[in-house]
Structure formats: structure tokens, C-alpha cells
Amino acid sequence: MSAFARPLGQPPADAASLKGDGGKGAPTSLVALTRYGLERQARGDFQAAVEAFRAVAGAAPRQALVWNNLALALGGLGDHEQAAIALRKSLDIDASQVSAWVSLAASLLQLGRPDEAESACDGAIARDPDNGDAWQIRAMVLAGRDDFGGAAAAFARTIEITGETGALRANLGVTLFKSGAFHEAQRNFDAAMALEADANADEIVEMARLCRFVVAGLDGDMTRVTAISRELTGAAETDTLFKTALLCLDWAGRKGPAALIAQTWAALRPGNLEARHMADAAMGRPVERQPAAFVAQHFDGMAEQFDEKLVGRLGYRGPEEIRNLMAAWIDADAALDVLDIGCGTGLCGPVLRPYAQRLTGVDLSDGMLAKARAGGLYDELRCADLVDTLSQAGARWDMIVAGDTFPYVGTLGGVFDGAAATLKSGGWLIFSTEAAEGDGVTLRGNGRYAHGRGYIADLAAGRFDIIERRSTMLRREAGVALEGDYFMMRKI
């Protein structure tokens, strides 16, 4: 799909003979300028093309073709903002141009303005219901909103109009998979693999394997599950396949198949602490805390790519949410003794440093602490358990922060006891939790703990005032938003 509308005219046969010569023999008529711009564009000299088309637009601003040509050249430069402006001017002159609506939608999607992109798709589809490009862009917009059912329908319509390609079938497979239609997704991945021959084939194969694995679990065929897992050569890849499948099944609410797959994983990898913990989670066994050794091992293994994965791919906004809470209630005057429990790679360090006279971080993972140490924002970093840290006698902290930490802890009685004992009077406790149904603690199928608001309120009672609670998306998991709460409390 072209990112921008094609110019409605083509360069004449002699366009290649036109040369730019620093203005000495530059074309002067609008026709010659247009030919010159098209020739420069064909040669990849988009800057010269933009200059030529801008000159034409200045002289003939009521010609839609002029703005289309300019938009195409601007697109070649990667200037999607100005391209969108040019396309809107073209459509103001002639709103019947389907290709211009499609190009505008593509530009707006590139700019991260999905609502406007969808409106432009509507403009194209209203004039041509069988425009495959417009339906494809609409599918991408819907997928970006996590409306995977709607995205799947739009991709299916695209295929109906344009015919099959491996990429389209794979995209349809992904959206069906994320909407929980796993068997139908597998059929589309199989079709994609039969069609696709380019460099994207490896990615399609990987996703198709995950889908086959999940479907085997849904069918209760653990022999097939084991066979698919053995297609992978490394233990790490095998573990990732099992864990990803469990996360997808947990999101889809398919507890029975998840329990079968988790038991199979634990049996195949009896020494793997994560496999054992995920089996406990999938089978609903009561486990008060994740084993410290497992937490340390898990985060050591992902330290190098942790920030990119959590923030870049999963959309984690914890530091920003904590910054907003703090800014509303506390002066950033570098006067506080601050403890960051579960500090990880130090993502909260830049947020906490302006408030801290002394900033201390605690984590179980040496690998994560090494990354935090490299950032140079902490006065002290300790490899220690947070409950052990909080059990040390004496009120010593003005603020304790736990961003995305409690989901890996479980029951929080000891944490609140320690925080109440070690915070100074009027000290702050700031943390996030994953949302739970009910008022207790739930070990979820994803291996993390969710905490009910009533449970948190009971722990706070008589010791902390709940100053503010904000409910929001914590991050994405298996392609969908994971909801939770940010709490700001003050010691009574």
C-alpha cells in the first residue's frame, strides 16, 4: 500500500531530460516546474521535488493535483505532518478523491493520530466501499485500540477485496489470536505460511507455532503440546513458549487448558522454579509469596532487555504515574530520605531523585541492580528482600516507593508492618497493585498477585491515610490492557 496518493498525472516522456542547475536554467512555467518536480521525485531527490511543488502550489493553490504531488514528495522526505496538511488542502478542493483520503489516513496513522486516521478511512470507504487500502488502515487503527475483533473483521474485508497475501493472512491470524479465536487463527497462520516467501516468514512461523501450541492445549492433547515444544532447540525458547501460552490462556479465561499446559511444563522442566510457580498459579494453589530465588532468577535473566520490553513493548507508565501523584502532594526540594523497594533497573530513579536527600534502592536481582548502578542516581543499592529491609528497627524513611513490586510479593501484611515501623511520622507510602476481583489476594494465572482494594484498605486502617488512589492501565499483557491502581498513603 502506498503511503501517499499517487499524483493524478504522470511525468511526460521528456521529463528525464530536465535538469536542475542551481537556478541558471531552472524551469519557470508551472507545467515545466511540475515536470521537473516529478522527475526529481522519480530520481529520489525529494527535497528538490518539494521545492518545485511548493512553487507550483503557491501559484495555483486551487488545483487539487498540485497538493497531491506535494504530499507525495513530502512523504518521500518522511514529513508526514506537512503531507497531511497538503492532503487536507487537496480534499478541501475536491473531496471525491478516494486515493487522497487513503493517503491522509496513512499519514495520520504514521503520526500516531488513530482517531483522525479512522475518520479519513471513513471518508475513503464512504466514496468507495471496496477500497482495500482503507480497510487495511482501519484494521490497523482498531488493532492499536485493542479492538481485535473489529480489526479481524476489517482484515477479513481487506482480503475479500484485494485477495490473499501472506502478510494479510498473518495479520488476520494475529488479531483472531488476540481476540481469543485460537482455532480460526491457526487456520489463517497456516494459510499465511503457505503464501509467504519473504523475510517475514520466520516471524509468521514463530507465531503460528505459538498458536498451534495453544490450540493443542485447548484440545487437551498434551502429546501434541510436548511435540511442539520439542521443535525448539533451547531450554530458554521452550520456557518462553510455555509461559507465553499460559499468559494468553489466562487472558482468555481458559483455566482448564492452562492448568494442563502448566503441569506439562513443570513435568518437563522439574528444576525450573518458574515452571513450578506457574503450575501453582494455573491450578489455583494458595501460595503466599513468590519464592525469592525464583524472583531473583527471573529478573536476572531479563535485566538486559527489561527497560525496552516493559516500557517499549508493554507500555509501562509506572514512573510517570508515580511522578504525577508526587507532584500533586509533595515539594521536590531534595529533602527526603527515600527507599525504592523493588527498584529493578532504576526506572523510578529519575522521578525520585528530585525529592531525595538520600535515595536507596533495594532489589533481589543483582542483574537489575547492576543496571540501576550504571544510572548513577542512587546513593545506595542493596541486594536484599524488601521485607527483611523493612524489618530493620527504627523510623528512618520519609518515603517508601514500590512501583510494580507488590504483584511479585503476594500477601502484604509484613510489608505494611515494616513500612509503618520504618516510616517517619507523616511519611509517604506510594505503590501500585494489579486489580483483583473481590477484597483479597489472588495468585493469577500469569504468576503474579492481584490485590483487592478492600484488602489494601484493611492493611492501611489505623496506620495510613489513603490520600489518593488512581485506577489506570498498568501495562499491556498478551496484547491487552492490564488494569490496576496507584496508591498514595501517608503515615498517621
Image (spheres, rainbow, N blue to C red):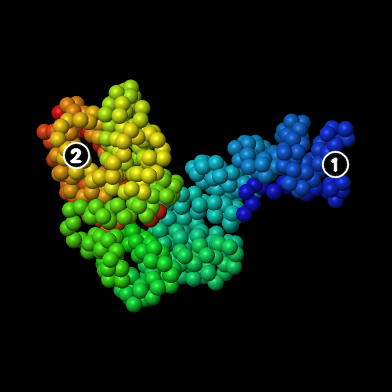
Residue 450 seen in the current view: no
Image coordinates for residue 32, horizontal then vertical, percent: 84, 39
* Residue furthest to the bottom: 223
Image coordinates for residue 23, horizontal then vertical, percent: 84, 32
Q: Residue at horizontal 67%, vertical 44%?
A: 76
In the figure, 121 relative to 241: above or below? above
Image coordinates for residue 427, horizontal then vertical, percent: 21, 28
Q: Quadrant of residue 33?
A: top right
Considering the image in quadrants, where does the N terminus appear?
Answer: bottom right
Q: Is residue 229 left or right of residue 157?
A: left
Considering the image in quadrants, where does the C terminus appear?
Answer: top left
In the figure, 234 relative to 3: above or below? below
**Separation (CA) of disc 2 from disc 1:** 75 Å
Q: Residue at horizontal 49%, vertical 42%?
A: 115
In the figure, 467 relative to 269: above or below? above
* Residue furthest to the left: 462
Image coordinates for residue 181, horizontal then vertical, percent: 39, 64
Circle 2 packing at 10 Å, graded few (<14), some (14-19), many (20+), is many
Give the number of the disc on residue 390.
2
* Residue in the foreground of this view, choosing between 8 and 257: 257
Q: Quadrant of residue 284?
A: bottom left
* Residue in the foreground of this view, choosing between 207 and 31: 207
* Camera-nearest label, 2 or 1: 2
Q: Is residue 13 left or right of residue 139?
A: right
Kind of residue sitting beneath label 2: Leu
Q: Which residue, given by chain and number where applicable, does mark 1 sit on? A: 19
Kind of residue sitting beneath label 1: Lys
Q: Quadrant of residue 285?
A: bottom left
Q: Earlier in the sequence, mark 2 or mark 1?
A: 1
* Residue in the foreground of this view, choosing between 116 and 18: 18
Secondary structure under badge 1? loop
